[in-house]
Image (spheres, grey):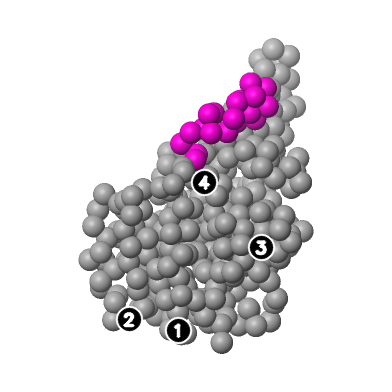
Amino acid sequence: MTSLSLIIAIYNRKDELFELLNSLSHQTDKDFEVIIIDDGSLVNLRPTTELFTESLDIQFFRKDNSGPGLSRNYGARRANNEWLVFVDSDVIVETNYIENIKKNLTLIPCDAFGGADKAHKGFNLMQKAISYSMTSVFTTGGIRGNKKSVSRFQPRSFNMGVKKTVFEQVGGFSEMRIGEDPDLSMTLWENGFTTAFFSDIGVYHKRRTDFGKFSKQVYQFGCARPILNQRHPKYVKLSFAFPTVFMLGYVLGFVEYFVLQKGVILGFYGFYTILVFFHALYKTRNISIASFAVISTYIQMFSYGYGFLKSWVLLNIFRQQPEEAFPSHFHRE
């Protein structure tokens, strides 16, 4: 019988922890353990956890802050089951989440797996817009939302499972604070392990609650990508630089308009804006969400693009080491 240990690394986020544990407490399959790692939170999370001790098999640990990757490793070392399932603290799972994971593992041979993320009907308009921009084919190519968009699925830690023996063999998550999940996926591939996409284990992912926080988050993702490219050169793709090209093209469009009195480039961005708006409107059936989606899409492209460009220049032109250029992206035990 397949056995699962669900691992949650968390920093603060007490209310979101309650929502996640509440969704886990209503699972159709209740045969799993939950391991919560409090990564040095400034609020007391134990009372929230204790609300669910009768409905869930929970272990709670508190440790000094080290970032999500190393905290997940801490939890993995204390897991009792065959499979490790990692979810972010800001997700909600459907009632058949555990049941569907076990069903898929009996049907699809793999060493690691992942699923999509989506917006819950209870999320606010901004959260739904951000969810759109992070999963749309016109922004990320849809790589976070389904396997059809990629040749090989790369699980992400908001919804990711790994066989415990395999996780231990590759050393778990690395010292990276940002980008630690694609780093693990590519490390698995480099060691000959397989990953799979499970279509029916999607989670509702809240992400950031305002555009400012979202901008900072995707900027950090952009900074991490050239670091990942150095660590895993076999898996570098030209598409990783698309947001930077998008950002620079937008600037060039204004130069063209004011210097040459032409608007060809800006016309392309106008067409892209209309395309995103109507695609988001088709997907969400809400004009307000579609309007916000245009804003979140441009924030995502510009913030990620700037982060990628800055990181690429520091690492490849100035030849800085990643730990020197972005010390906040790393932590060592």
Are circles 1 and 4 on residues that touch, CB within 8 Å? no
- As drawn, 64 above or below 61: above
The spot of residue 137 in percent (x, y) is 67, 52
Q: Choose top left, top right, bottom left or bottom right for residue 152.
A: bottom right
The crowd level at tag 2 (other Cα within 10 Å; few <14, some 14-19, many 20+) is some
Query: What amino acid does circle 3 point to?
Result: Asn
From the image, tell me which residue sits under label 3: 146
From the image, tell me which residue sits under label 2: 55
**Secondary structure type for disc 1:** loop
Q: Which residues are magenta?
A: 311-330
Q: Measure the C-alpha gap from mark 3 to mark 4.
A: 28 Å
* 321, 313: nearer the viewer: 321
Residue at 66% across / 69% down in the picture?
111
Query: What amino acid does circle 1 point to?
Result: Asp
The spot of residue 199 in percent (x, y) is 63, 71
Q: Quadrant of the N terminus?
A: bottom right
Instruction: Please identify the dominant SS of the magenta region.
Output: helix
**Secondary structure type for disc 4:** loop
The crowd level at tag 3 (other Cα within 10 Å; few <14, some 14-19, many 20+) is many
Residue at 57% across / 57% down in the picture?
171
* 207, 160: nearer the viewer: 160
Which numbered dot is residue 175?
A: 4
**Secondary structure type for disc 3:** loop
The crowd level at tag 1 (other Cα within 10 Å; few <14, some 14-19, many 20+) is some
Residue at 55% across / 42% down in the picture?
221
Q: Measure the C-alpha gap from mark 2 to mark 4.
A: 34 Å
